Image (tube, rainbow, N blue to C red):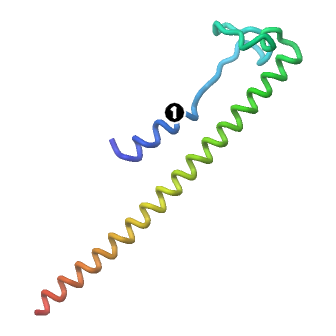
Amino acid sequence: MSYIARTRTPLLRAICNIRMYSGEPGSGAGKGGGGGGAIREAGGAFGKMEAAREDEFFYKKQKEQLANIKGHLDKEISFHQEQIKRHEDAIRRHKEQMAEINNK
């Protein structure tokens, strides 16, 4: 398995969490076993407002995670570009050394 495949899989898995609702969000206790608290169980306007706040929280969390992934990938790209530059310099030096050896 390649290095990139091993590093990206856990990051993407962390983002791809899916939440299931039974009915409309905030409309009362769901079938998942837990009600989500007294406000969510009661339903009504407060339940819907709490569901909206929860959705907003997870939306912001997902945006933060995506920004972190993008930053991490940018760092990896710049690291690999620097490695390419170093390797190209090494290739050039070795070719010069070979040319010196051939001229002698």
> Label 1: few (<14), some or many (≥20) within 10 Å?
few
Q: Nearer the viewer, residue 2 or 33?
A: 33
The outermost residue toward the right is 45
Residue 67 located left or right of residue 52 = left
The outermost residue toward the left is 104
Q: Is residue 13 above or below residue 75?
A: above
Q: Residue at x 78, y 22 (%)?
A: 51
What type is the residue that disc 1 sits on? Arg
Q: Residue at x 69, y 32 (%)?
A: 58
Residue 61 located left or right of residue 6 = right
Q: Residue at x 33, y 76 (%)?
A: 89
Residue 12: image x %, image y %?
Answer: 52, 37
- Circle 1 is placed at which residue position? 13
Residue 48: image x %, image y %?
Answer: 83, 20
Residue 60: image x %, image y %?
Answer: 71, 38
Give the SS element for disc 1: helix
Residue 99: image x %, image y %?
Answer: 19, 87
Q: Is residue 34 above or below residue 61?
A: above
Residue 65 located left or right of residue 83 = right
Quadrant housing the N terminus:
top left
